């Protein structure tokens, strides 16, 4: 149970100081309550006591949202494009969740950019929920907390979840592991539109958008991209021109998203989501293994002793790590 000393709201039914439980939060999320959603994301992001039970309950209620990753280099206009997409999805009565992954502060570990600073016009729309998440050192732009936030929004009944990554070139590839489709946003005049920085992005994009298409060099950049994009699984990713500042070209982008969704068979979607579940399992295992190592090796000076053996030439990192692993998991070392 999560016990948080908070000002009582409708969950407590009282005024003054009270206790908000994990059961209250989970129930509120399933009802689509924005306050419960926000607090639950915080509980899961900070891994507060009892977060596991909330996560387990919500994980059995999701699986209906369509998750769209928005990847691309810094300055390409991803946030502006998301503003345009929100308007279009809301016009179609779809509830929209946005997870904006920002660089982490080296001091607090929190996100450096505020969500409603960039998407202020949607902040009062009950059908839109926007959350900034810190990448927390994950250069792929996708932290474990981001995955959990997607789960919460899915369980809360949001139809479409847009995930904007931190914007660091090839290292954005992690977004493809959690999205049902990925939109890659580029812009002309960057000098290497389809060179090394974009090479990885070419492999994950389901739709490519050349934003700021009014700039000089846009025609050349689009042509390069069209010649570089390859067909995958019977789908040739389209290359679209946009001027997101004016939302020019967003209708064509929505059509491309619709066509992509229509062509996905249940088997293909199952494969994508099985891969996502596998990745989440691996993430969870890594986290628990790190906690186990911290618990069993750092408290009694074990790591320091083995480090001294390495420095003295009486062991090496490979041998020492094998012995430590056998100690942690109580299995016979292969070395």
Image (cartoon, grey):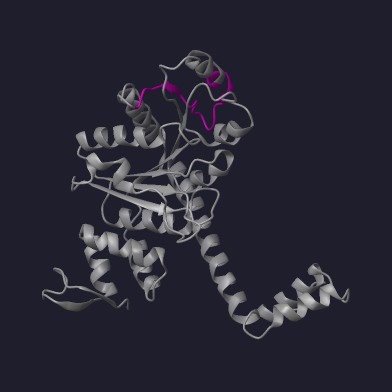
Q: Residue furthest bottom?
A: 300
Q: Is residue 58 left or right of residue 103?
A: left
Quadrant where the C terminus sits is bottom right
Q: Residue 63 at what x, y percent from top left?
A: 35, 53
Q: Residue furthest front?
A: 107
Q: Is residue 287 left or right of residue 66?
A: right
| Label tally | 0
Q: Residue 86 at what x, y percent from top left?
A: 28, 37
Q: Residue at x 48, y 27 (%)?
A: 237
**On screen, residue 244 above or below 220:** below
The rendered magenta stretch, by its main secondary structure, is classed as: loop
Q: Residue at x 47, y 44 (%)?
A: 166
Q: Which residues are magenta?
A: 225-244
Q: Residue at x 22, y 57 (%)?
A: 34
Q: Is residue 237 visible?
A: yes
**On screen, residue 274 above or below 226:** below
Residue 47 sits inside the magenta stretch: no
- In the image, 75 versus 127, the foreground residue is 75
Which quadrant holds residue 28?
Answer: bottom left
Q: Residue 276 at what x, y percent from top left?
A: 48, 52
Q: Residue 249 at what x, y percent from top left?
A: 34, 22
Quadrant where the N terminus sits is bottom left
């Amino acid at each position: 149970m999560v016990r948080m000393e908070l000002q009582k709201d409708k969950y407590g039914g009282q005024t003054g100081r009270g206790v908000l439980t994990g059961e209250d939060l989970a129930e509120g999320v399933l009802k689509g309550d924005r306050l419960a959603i926000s607090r639950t994301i915080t509980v899961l992001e900070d891994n507060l006591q009892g977060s596991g039970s909330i996560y387990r309950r919500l994980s059995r209620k999701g699986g209906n949202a369509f998750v769209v990753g928005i990847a691309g280099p810094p300055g390409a206009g991803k946030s502006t494009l998301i503003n345009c997409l929100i308007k279009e999805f809301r016009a179609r009565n779809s509830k929209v969740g946005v997870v904006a992954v920002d660089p982490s502060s080296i001091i607090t570990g929190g996100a450096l950019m505020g969500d409603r600073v960039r998407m202020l016009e949607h902040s009062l729309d009950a059908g839109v929920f926007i959350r900034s998440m810190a990448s927390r050192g994950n250069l792929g732009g996708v932290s474990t907390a981001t995955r959990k936030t997607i789960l919460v929004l899915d369980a809360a009944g949001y139809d479409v979840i847009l995930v904007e990554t931190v914007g660091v070139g090839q290292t954005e590839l992690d977004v493809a592991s959690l999205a049902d489709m990925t939109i890659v946003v580029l812009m002309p005049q960057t000098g290497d539109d389809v060179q090394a920085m974009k090479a990885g992005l070419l492999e994950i994009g389901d739709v490519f958008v050349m934003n700021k298409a009014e700039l000089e060099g846009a025609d050349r950049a689009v042509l390069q991209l069209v010649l570089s994009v390859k067909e995958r699984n019977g789908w040739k990713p389209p290359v679209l021109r946009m001027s997101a500042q004016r939302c020019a070209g967003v209708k064509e982008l929505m059509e491309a998203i619709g066509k992509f969704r229509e062509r996905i068979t249940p088997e293909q979607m199952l494969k994508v989501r099985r891969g996502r579940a596998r990745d989440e399992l691996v993430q969870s295992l890594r986290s628990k293994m790190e906690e186990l190592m911290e618990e069993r090796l750092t408290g009694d000076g074990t790591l320091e002793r083995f480090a001294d053996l390495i420095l003295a030439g009486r062991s090496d990192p490979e041998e020492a790590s094998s012995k430590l692993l056998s100690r942690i998991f109580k299995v016979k070392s292969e070395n």
